Image (spheres, helix red, strand yellow):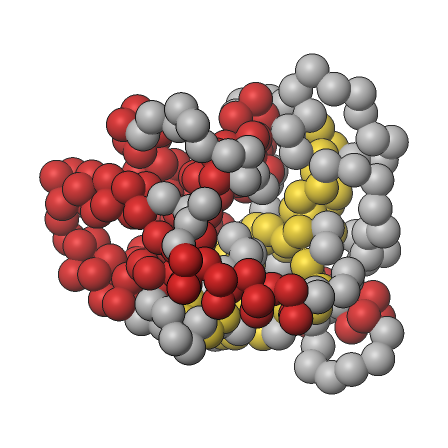
């Protein structure tokens, strides 16, 4: 199997040595190249939209330009990994291990994130702008109504597959990207980002994370979940405090 995993990055960083991984410099339009990285403004691309699409400019680049029987997306600080503890870099899955994980299924996904006391909708509304999700729902209702039941179920859950990470067989990958970027294109037309913070302006990357489960369930895609290793410290105390503060006092 010709499997390639794009590693989205915006700065020089450690990369797995396995040739399955392809470092892609995202949001590179108008910037200097990082030696050894592929630019996401080559070929057909949306590199200039990186401030709003985040690592999805790398996903789009792979969809339009990267050949392969299976395509994946990882992040320079987050990788699919073997279970366990110890050296984080040593736990990053190899190409053969990813192929094995893909055996018998259409996709490999990260283990879900659980918010426990928040639904997917309320967590997003407290952290960002609820209008992003409300507008997405309206678009699905008007143009892709078959996805609306799954959307409503996903929004009411407390868990979901996050990080815009996946490895998919080519046909599945192409179908996901075709639908995702069509929906996000409609959302981009309707949202007014005036007054959004720099973080909230990354809206299309955030919404994409919530749409993945909607698409998977509607299309009946089979998948296997594997752990994710974070190469940098997560500062869970600060994350939990911020999570609770947003829930109690709302989004600032």
Nearest the viewer among 155 and 26 is: 155
Please indicate, yes or no, whether residue 242 appears anywhere in the rendered image. yes
Measured as percent of width and height from the top left, residue 190 is found at 27, 27
All told, the count of numbered labels is: 0
Does residue 163 appear left or right of residue 2 in this picture?
left
Residue in the picture at 23% in, 45% down: 134
Residue in the picture at 69% in, 15% down: 30
Give the vertical position of 43 relative to 209 (above or below): above
Please indicate, yes or no, whether residue 99 appears anywhere in the rendered image. no
* Residue 140, quarter of the rendered image: top left
Nearest the viewer among 128 and 104 is: 128
* Residue 139, quarter of the rendered image: top left
Q: Quadrant of the C terminus?
A: top left
Measured as percent of width and height from the top left, residue 149 is found at 16, 61
Q: Quadrant of the N terminus?
A: bottom right
Give the vertical position of 25 relative to 160 (above or below): above
Residue in the picture at 71% in, 41% down: 9
Taking the view exactly as shown, the residue that stands out farthest to the top is: 30
Taking the view exactly as shown, the residue that stands out farthest to the front is: 249
Measured as percent of width and height from the top left, residue 175 is found at 37, 47
Residue in the picture at 59% in, 47% down: 68
Does residue 37 appear left or right of residue 113 in this picture?
right
Give the vertical position of 155 relative to 36 (above or below): below
């Amino acid at each position: 199997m010709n499997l390639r995993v794009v590693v989205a990055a915006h700065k020089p960083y450690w990369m797995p040595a396995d040739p399955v991984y392809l470092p892609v410099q995202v949001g590179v339009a108008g910037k200097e190249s990082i030696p050894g990285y592929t630019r996401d403004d080559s070929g057909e691309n949306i590199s200039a939209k990186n401030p709003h699409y985040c690592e999805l400019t790398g996903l789009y680049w792979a969809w339009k330009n990267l050949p392969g029987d299976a395509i994946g997306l990882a992040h320079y600080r987050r990788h699919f990994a073997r279970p366990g503890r110890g050296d984080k870099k040593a736990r990053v899955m190899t190409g053969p291990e990813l192929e094995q994980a893909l055996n018998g299924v259409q996709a490999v996904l990260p283990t879900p994130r659980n918010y426990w006391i928040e639904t997917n909708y309320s967590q997003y509304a407290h952290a960002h702008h609820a209008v992003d999700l409300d507008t997405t729902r309206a678009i699905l209702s008007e143009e892709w109504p078959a996805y609306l039941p799954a959307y409503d179920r996903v929004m009411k859950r407390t868990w979901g597959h996050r990080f815009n990470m996946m490895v998919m067989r080519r046909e599945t990958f192409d179908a996901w990207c075709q639908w995702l970027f069509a929906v996000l294109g409609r959302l981009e037309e309707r949202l007014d980002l005036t007054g959004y913070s720099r973080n909230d302006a990354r809206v299309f990357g955030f919404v994409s994370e919530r749409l993945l489960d909607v698409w998977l369930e509607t299309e009946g895609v089979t998948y296997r979940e594997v752990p994710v290793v974070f190469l940098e410290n997560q500062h869970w105390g600060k994350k939990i405090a911020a999570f609770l503060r947003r829930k109690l006092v709302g989004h600032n």
